[in-house]
Image (cartoon, rainbow, N blue to C red):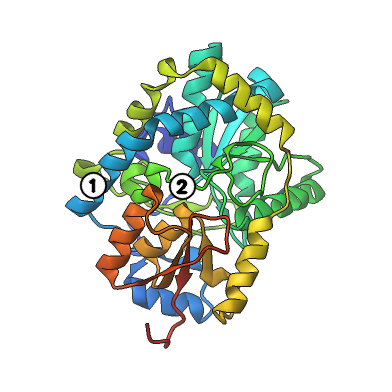
Amino acid sequence: MEAETMEVKSSTEFGSYSKEDVVFLLKDLSNIQLEGSTEDREKRIQSGQHYSETLPIEYNPPANYLQLFSETLKEYKEKVAECTAIVSEQIYHKTGSRTVLVSLARAGTPIGILIKRYIQRKYGSILPHYSISIIRDKGIDEAALLFILQKHKDCSIQFIDGWTGKGAISIELTKACKQFNEKYGIKLDDTLAVLADPGYCTNLYGTREDFLIPSACLNSTVSGLVSRTVLNKEYIGKEDFHGAKFYKELLPHDVSNLYLEEITAEFPLLNQIAITAAVKKNWEDQEISFKGMEEVKNIQEVFEIDSSHYVKPGVGETTRVLLRRVPWKILMKDPKSPYVRHIVMLAEERGVEIIPYEHMSYTCCGLIKKVGQSI
């Protein structure tokens, strides 16, 4: 009964997306003060507090961020639509109308919505779509999974995220699915569907190119005004869903649905012959090597970094480092690449050194500053 109440509340009051697009299975923590300054939060995390116990402060995006988002959306909306189509075709051919889309909050949520919309438009099949929490080193929200499985008997769950970095969430998902099977005797498919897989962490992807997905340029204002997910024992009980906040005060600045509409409008314009060819090519390239993790280890050694947690490869992860962590240095394969224009802007704004670094397959990589270390 508790989970049922949460679902109704989530679908009608939580987040700025339509309930036809997604149902958030998250406990509403909007009235709880969980934010701290970036520097203070970084100190707490590096001193042992888990990142999921608190939240970074989210602001009304500055004009230059919004301009950057608009420019990148205009430039890459066709590519995002293509990658959505490619991964959607693979998902639907795999499990068809039995599929329940389960996106990993929050970067996975807009991607899950786009996949749902594409499949509905192409095949006329309206797939259920939920957004749930998974947290590195803590696992997936089992209460949310049990709720979905109870509501959709004999379904096939398809997990969705935006992109892969070094593969931490892919590894966490595999581990969580194994534990779920051991605990409940229910085997889940741990394959993670993503738009971009530069780290070679999954065989269900739109592309392996490390390109800029425009939603990486902003935080909650392009993610349904929902915060990162929270797992803090002070507020989350054993039977509760993981938590999150709904930033209603940012409604005037919300571009979440604009983003969806811009990408969705590209679907009818796609070259289906090219999409089919890309799907065939992806089926032939099923390599899962986590080669990005090896590159991260090399970077860690070269720059004498204590933990791989301080190395964040890929355009999306580098963007996150600059937006909500304390960055130390930014490595760039090609500083003149159009995919890193926003990275250059953010780095200059925060006074972070950019280092040309050709020895990686990623477009760029963000290094987090160690507390007490001078920049």
Looking at the picture, tell me which residue is in the foreground, 228 or 330. 330
Relative placement, left or right, of 194 versus 350 is right
The quadrant in which the N terminus is found is top right
Q: Amino acid at mark 1?
A: Leu
Q: Which residue is mark 2?
A: 106
Q: Residue at x 26, y 40 (%)?
A: 70
Q: Report which quarter residue 286 is drawn in.
A: top right
Q: Position of residue 185 (x, y in %)?
A: 82, 43
Q: Element type at marker 1?
A: helix
Q: Amino acid at mark 2?
A: Arg
Q: Position of residue 46 (x, y in %)?
A: 50, 78
Relative placement, left or right, of 341 versus 105 is left
Q: Which mark is residue 66?
A: 1
Q: Element type at marker 2?
A: loop
Q: Report which quarter residue 159 is drawn in.
A: top right
Q: Indicate whether 116 appears above or below 29.
A: above
Q: Is residue 1 visible?
A: no
Instruction: Name the N-terminal-most of marks 2 and 1.
Output: 1
Q: Residue at x 38, y 28 (%)?
A: 263
